[in-house]
Every structure is written in structure tokens, then in C-alpha cells.
Amino acid sequence: MDPIADLLTSIRNANQALKTEIIVPHSKIKESAVKLLKEEGYLESFNVEGDVKRTLRIGLKFQGRKGVITDLQRVSRPGLRRYTSSKEIPMVLGGMGIAVVSTPQGLMTGDDARRQNVGGELLFKVW
């Protein structure tokens, strides 16, 4: 029922199992989230595959035998939505992680949302 939570769980499980690549069903919000994680340096690569039944092939990033992503935490969920203003977007580990916010301009990091002075739904945190 919750595509973002499914994506985060798949990434978390593959990271713990030291898998270099995973395949998840495609959706626009998942593609935006994965693109943002790649731009921030948490993922190695991603591709959209297929025409009718589209999937996302995600390449995970590792440093030795440890994943770059230490943890992922879902904040807003279907049963309890969490909205925040630009001034109240939390810092994750003192700036070492990122908060992903769904804004009217699309998905963006908490830092970008603060700079552009836009708030929105606080989807998840990564560190």
C-alpha cells in the first residue's frame, strides 16, 4: 500500500545483505526519490527498464564491506502524514544525512527546501 516504504525496505534489506543491485516496481515518486538519492551520493546508479511493466534497477554503493547508507527512516506514512514548514525541516545527524521533502516543486532535500523557502510533506530521512 505504501510504495515509498516498500522502496526503503528493499534498499535497507539489500544493503544489509551486501547486494550490489536490486530491482523494484516503477512509479514516478520512486523514480524521483531514487534520482535524488543518486544525486546526493547514496546510490551508485539507477535505470528505468521495460515498456509495459516498468521496473527500476538500482545499484547500491559500498565502502569496503559496509554500505554508504547507514539507515533509512520513513517519517510521513499513509496513516499519519507529517507536514513541515521550511523553517521546521529537521537537520539529520547535524547535516551528515538528508531529509527528503515532497514540495509543490517536486521532491527535494531538506537543505534545498530551506534555501527555496518551501515546506511540504517530510517523506523520509537517510544517513
Image: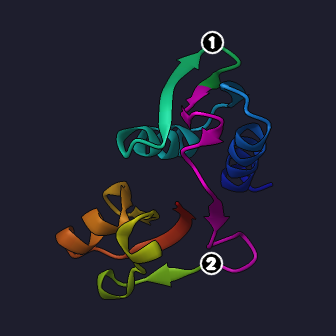
Compute the Cα span from label 2 to label 1.
32 Å
* Residues at marks 2 and 1 touching, judged by CB atoms closer than 8 Å: no
Q: Is residue 9 magenta?
A: no
* Residue 15 in the image, given as x and y percentages of width and height: 70, 41
Residue at the outermost bottom position:
88
Which quarter of the rendered picture does the N terminus lie within? bottom right
Which of the two discs, 2 and 1, labels the residue nearer the N terminus? 1
Q: Looking at the image, can residue 104 be seen?
A: yes
Residue at (54, 33) in percent of width and height: 61
Packing grade of label 2 (10 A; few <14, some 14-19, many >=20) is few
| Residue 72 lies within the magenta run | yes
Judge whether 110 appears above or below 18 on screen: below
Q: Is residue 80 above or below residue 98?
A: below
* Disc assigned to residue 50: 1
110 sits to left or right of 48: left
- Disc 1, SS: loop
Residue 20 rendering spot, x and y as whole percentages: 66, 25
Residue under the image location 71 percent in, 18 percent down:
53
> Magenta residues?
58-80
Disc 2 element? loop
Residue drawn at x 64%, y 59% is 71
Residue situated furthest top in the rendering = 51
Residue drawn at (28%, 73%), measured in percent from left and top? 118
Q: Kindly tell me whether residue 92 is visible in this rendering.
A: no
Quarter location, residue 87: bottom left
Rendering coords of residue 119 (x, y %): 35, 76
Kind of residue sitting beneath label 1: Gly
Badge 1: residue crowd in 10 Å (few <14, some 14–19, many ≥20): few
Number of numbered markers: 2
User: As shown in the figure, which amino acid type bears the numbered disc 2?
Assistant: Arg
The residue beneath circle 2 is 81
Colour scheme in the image?
Answer: rainbow
